[in-house]
Amino acid sequence: MLTIKRVPTVVSNYQEDAAAAEPLGCGRNCLGHCCLAVSKLPLYAFPNVPKPIKISPKEDRSSDFFLNTLLLGQWEDRMSRGLFRYDVTACETKVIPGKLGFIAQLNEGRHLKKRPTEFRVDRVLQPFDSSKFNFTKVGQEEVLFRFEAGGGNLPHYYDHAPVNQNSPPSVVAINVSPIEYGHVLLIPRVLECLPQRIDPDSFLLALHMAEEAGSPYFRLGYNSLGAFATINHLHFQAYFMSTQFPVEKAPTGMVTVTEGGVKVSRLLEYPVRGLVYECGNTLKELSDLVSSVCIWFQENNIPYNVLISDMGKKIFVFPQCYAEKQALGEVSQELLDTQVNPAVWEISGHMVLKRKKDYEEASEAYAWRLLAEVSLSADRFNEVEENLFEATGTVKPEQMHKEGERLKESAFADAIAEGCVVLQ
């Protein structure tokens, strides 16, 4: 069994008291069966009618209401109530000079004076454990609204909506240890107590949230177990940052276009090897393909991270091995001392640093060095990619482009030339 020790991220003000909390009938107005079933939280019901993916940005009143009035407005309300552990808007942030423009943030509020907790990192799928902290123990004051499928072609908003016993509620809650403005958690079917594993319905829910936000600056992310998810209760993270992520600037090499219209590409000239899925005839076709990719990673015990970008139309998937290397003692002490946990945001180029020294000395070479440790090796990635494509029916091995090998290797070519990566 491989384990690492790390300080767990506190995402709820109820997290540290979870062990002492009563399991039922707690009287704390929580998200468990005892309280949520009789609650009347606000509900945003999005249209659940299959429709073509829009290439141009979505500009309508519903998007403005969902993102600015409802999500960000309610997030600011919770900030004014003092529910966050620190003011993330006061954290220093800068763009690191270089080709990709990695973003560095000094977030000393996340550096907790707590003893590290041991996490198992060699099992992507682990059973839900109700004795550990989970989101049913979150207080309803940390919840912004429910986010669920409605009917018809238009979204609907209800200030107070009773819970339908036949339709488990999905909720959007604040992350009390935010790393950026508007940092929230999307918790699908919270009462079902699902472990941290993607399924088709939950992934489609996340894409709908990106679509309803209607802004390229609002992104969702997912971390599997073994890839720096610390809470084994199904959830996505999301926040608003009004700049392009470095990974979004990186070039890609197209592999194929599926029958469903999904463009599949490899990420190039970036320190972490990954796959990119774009567009599709409908949001559901894109979601079905990418969720099948995630399920394949889960079933083959490969830790991974997902970034949902461009209003749900572009998705980056990164198999990774940093925690495994850390458990095996293969990561340098210099990188470990930074206490940076390379999850989806760091991999995408938003480096959350906990020491002022690291922030002041941050460079593109440092970002490359850290993220190169995250990436699978070229040989391992090639093997995973071939098996994945065959298993998901994306493309058969004999259909691979003749230049495939060159494309797979070119992700590191520019970095080596610029001295960002030193070959051993």
Image: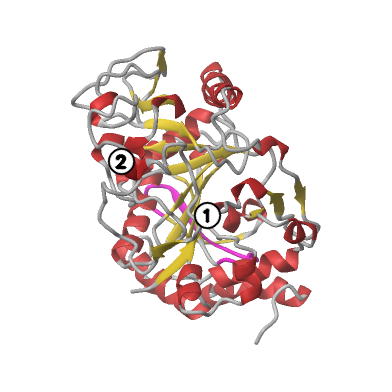
Position of the N terminus by quadrant? bottom left
Camera-nearest residue between 266 and 209: 209
| Residue 259 in the image, given as x and y percentages of width and height | 37, 51
Label 2 is placed on what type of residue? Asp
Left or right: residue 103 versus residue 283 is: right
Quadrant position of residue 119:
bottom left
Furthest residue toward top: 159
Residue shown at 46%/29% (left/top)? 142
**Count of picture labels:** 2
Give the residue pinned by disc 2.
Answer: 201
Instruction: Specify which label sits upstream in the sequence, 1 or 2.
Output: 1
Left or right: residue 165 versus residue 90 is: left
Quadrant position of residue 75:
top right
| Residue 107 seen | no
Q: Which residues are magenta?
A: 258-272
| Residue 317 in the image, given as x and y percentages of width and height | 47, 57
Give the residue pinned by disc 1.
Answer: 114
Q: Is residue 108 above or below residue 182?
A: below
Residue 359, magenta (yes or no)? no
